[in-house]
Image (tube, rainbow, N blue to C red):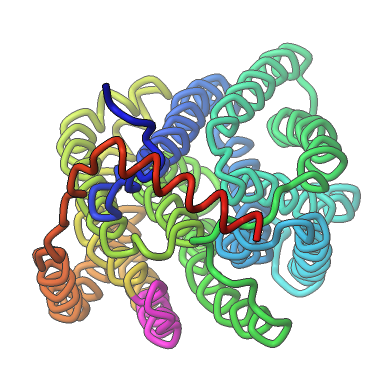
Amino acid sequence: MDGPAVDREPAPVSRRRFAPSLELNALALMAATGITALVGLGFWAVAARLPASEVGRASAVLSTATMLSLLASSNIGLLFSRVLASAGGKSRSVVLAGYGAATGIGAILGVGFVLFIPNDALFDSWLDRATFPLLVVLFCIFVLQDWVLIGLRAARWVPLEQLLFALAKLGLLVLFSALVLDGGIVLAWAIPCLLTVLIINPLLLGRVLPNRPPPASGAAEMPSRRGLGIIFLAEYATGAMAVVIPLSLPLIVVSQLGTQANAYYALPWLIAESLGVLIWNISSSYMVEASHDGPQIAALMRRTFRLSFLVGGLGVPFLLVAAPWLLSFLGPDYAAEGTTVLRLMVAAIPFTIIVLMYVTTSRVKNQMGRVVAIQLLSAIMVIGLALALIPRLGIDGAGWAYLIAEAIAAAIVIVPLIRFMRANQVSLLRKPPPVTEPVPVPASTNIARAAADAVTERT
């Protein structure tokens, strides 16, 4: 008869199974992106029944407000993905501070855009101009609440939130179109966004964040205030560069070709950008998991690479073939004018994956100067090429500018990226030290050891 298992050894660390949080959270975020893209396609299909000039104006207003909100908040969201893993009881204070910084920056950017950027083609009245900064602030909080969920490893709730938001804005658009309501496209977008913010944030700030447990043993250490400031500034610089291109291209198209041409450009851009966001979702999930489980960074990076190339390898061929069919849902004019620009932007995705992998690698190694440099270079190339090509090629010039710039950026970073991947692979292939199996101990020895331990405790 075997004795009690008093001295059983724990499972060796090298045999520990990975929790599938990276893949599950990435899939949840990709599902949210897919929901947004599919229902968004239906949203713009309904909007396409309205005059093209109104669709172009509304899409430019929404894209500008979205990009300004991302400029104000995306860097703070990345900060959440790093810090919430170790914040513990300070989580609510961290989130409130991030909300305050983002909304303050968003309000300044919104007011600055209204006062100092030519915008007569975007706003019909003083009321539109007055409410635009509020729209930017609203979008800031809407973006950050998703980052809070991601940082808490609760990304599975994001698809449900996005589904309800997308269905609500689609329903309101149908209603407002039937009522021939001025500004109906923007209102149909803003009202569900406001309701979502008013429902989710009281739950986060009132119940979830105040009751968080202490950080896990493998989580990264909570940075000091100075460290948080450095991370914030670095992430803000990269976030600013990341949104310059989506913010600038619609404005260049509107200024050179008019709002109707922007309608034919903006919708293909949204479709191509959806695939890019899928890749970004994977990197975001990686950052969260690396913050929660630092010792597994190398393996997490390998899984991130594999999933990114899988998604890109499936999505790019599909969109290249299906481009005219997808745009045909919006109308024959959209298919005729937008197919080429959609294909050009989709063709840039493989290069974007390479650049994003380099950016993620540099971020993991805290080499933020490299991230800022490559983002700045990409922005300069895209904007410069767009200004040169759009007058000659129309909206296709924007597609060519994006493709050429991404290809050049990928050519620059491919060598250091390969070097890192090889070094990472070598570390993964190193064999762990041999695990010595515990020697079976007779039952009598176990009993004697237990008795000795009891005597020791009494003395």
Q: Residue at x 65, y 41 (%)?
A: 58
Residue 111 is at least partly visible in this image: no
Q: Which residues are magenta?
A: 362-380
Q: What quarter of the picture does the C terminus occupy?
A: bottom right
Left or right: residue 109 versus residue 448 is right
Left or right: residue 273 versus residue 83 is left
Q: Residue at x 44, y 58 (%)?
A: 293
Left or right: residue 441 versus residue 21 is left
Q: Nearer the viewer, residue 414 or 174?
A: 414
Residue 450 is at least partly visible in this image: yes
x, y (%) of residue 81? 56, 58
x, y (%) of residue 221? 58, 72
Give above or below for 119 relative to 274: below
x, y (%) of residue 311? 24, 41
Q: Nearer the viewer, residue 12 or 446?
A: 446
Left or right: residue 441 versus residue 9 is left
Q: Nearer the viewer, residue 35 or 175?
A: 35
Magenta region, mostly helix, strand or loop? Answer: helix
Count of numbered tags: 0
Give above or below for 372 relative to 391: below
- Residue 283 within the magenta-colored segment of the rendering: no
Q: Nearer the viewer, residue 30 or 420?
A: 420
x, y (%) of residue 110? 77, 63
Among the 4 quarters of the image, the one containing residue 129: bottom right
Q: Residue at x 12, y 67 (%)?
A: 425
Q: Residue at x 58, y 34 (%)?
A: 158
Q: What quarter of the picture does the N terminus occupy?
A: top left
